[in-house]
Image (tube, rainbow, N blue to C red):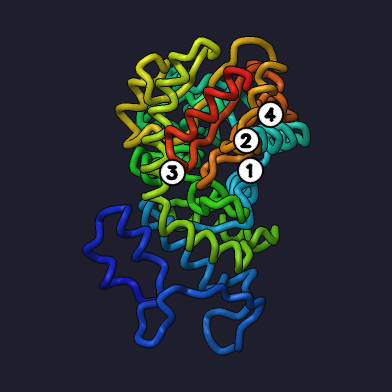
Amino acid sequence: MSTDLPLAGISSAESLLVAAGRDRRPGAPLNLPPVPASNFILGAERAYSRDDGTPTWEALEEIVGLLDGGHAVAFASGMAGIAAVFDQLHVGSQVVLPDDCYAGVVGLAELGRQKGHWSLRRLAVDDTEGWKRACADADLIWLESPSNPLLAVADVRAICSAARKPTALVAVDNTLATSLNQRPLDLGADVSFQSATKFIGGHSDLLSGVVTVKRDDLRAGLRRSRELNGATPGALESFLAVRGARTMALRLERAQTSAMVLAERLQAHPRVAHVRYPGLTSHPTHSVARALLKGFGTIISFDVRGDAAAADAVCSRVRLIHHATSLGAVESTMERRAGVPGQEHLPPSLLRLSVGIENVDDLWADLASALRGE
């Protein structure tokens, strides 16, 4: 692809999402097609896709890398990308995770601990001083901000400014914020991770993950892990992720505007006990969110009054909102997170709502009806 000159003057993320990752040579297709090739004619740099990639992967990597301000490496899934980051650790490393964290990360970290690969500590997301102290000894500080599903916002800038070992890594799971609301590398992180399954793809039709770094040695290590572990993204999945990325700014803007409206209405509803949304002034880390995030995101977690059965009943009654897992797509989804294996520690009546791009009043009518028991 030849993109240097056309992209040189573009500074906005919205324009980069549309302009990046294209072949601009005369006669090239306007939209880069999927390249379902495992091998290539010898005599050039690209020979075998597992080792050398494909133009489709590289388009996705270019888009996300430019958005994040670094160099992106695409993977077959979000967990594949996370595993590649952990793969950079030496045996005997110290890993620190937040207390509220994606269950897959916890499972991976626990498995490594059980096998003696590393030790593991957990800290509250908002314990900034604890994280800063942990930086002195840890080999991997894994932050998730906002966290999933309690939506706590970490003071990433303050934590990244703490003194740490030269070989230590600070990684931020930026999936819920996206590159449009937060750029962890600009805040001092070494690694920015996103599940492209979520907002980048945006249509619940692919699995992919992207890890962005600035250091060349980290990029090489991640690519090596992808190659040796066979964690390569599929051609169709990469094509769909690129296509989805083109509209991410519009989708995010619409959905998080609706999320703010719904969070305020849920907070006032008599059958809702508690609402967690970083945009609400009542949120414990609202001030940090205002300082670090450009937008408050599309995810709302709220506790229904009553027990788990009451929350399950609300999920069974929604019609426009889908009773399904995952987040970040055009359609709104909702589920009771404590019912998910590994998430039993969460409040039993907590529902996580991922707001899509539907009409906000239609979404509210659906929620209100379900809460009323209709």
| Side (left or right) of 209 relative to 181 | right
Q: Earlier in the sequence, mark 3 or mark 1?
A: 1
Q: CA distance from mark 4 to mark 3?
A: 30 Å
Pointers 3 and 1 in contact (CB under 8 A)?
no
Instruction: Please say if the residues under marks 1 and 2 sit with CB atoms less than 8 Å apart.
Output: yes
Residue furthest to the left: 9
Give 373 or 141, whichever is nearer the viewer. 373
Between disc 3 and disc 1, the foreground one is: 3
Q: Amino acid at mark 3?
A: Thr
Q: Quadrant of residue 140?
A: top right
Against 39, is 290 above or below?
Answer: above
Count of numbered badges drawn on the protein:
4
Q: Nearer the viewer, residue 224 or 50?
A: 50
Q: Which mark is residue 316?
A: 4
Label 1: few (<14), some or many (≥20) within 10 Å?
few
**Which of labels 4 and 3 is toward the front?**
4
Pick the front one: 55 or 43: 55
Q: Where does residue 368 sit, x and y in percent of width and height?
A: 52, 23
Q: Which residue is mark 2?
A: 93
Question: Where the C terminus falls, by quadrant?
Answer: top right
Q: Which residue carries the number 1 mark?
A: 90
For disc 3, the marked residue is 178
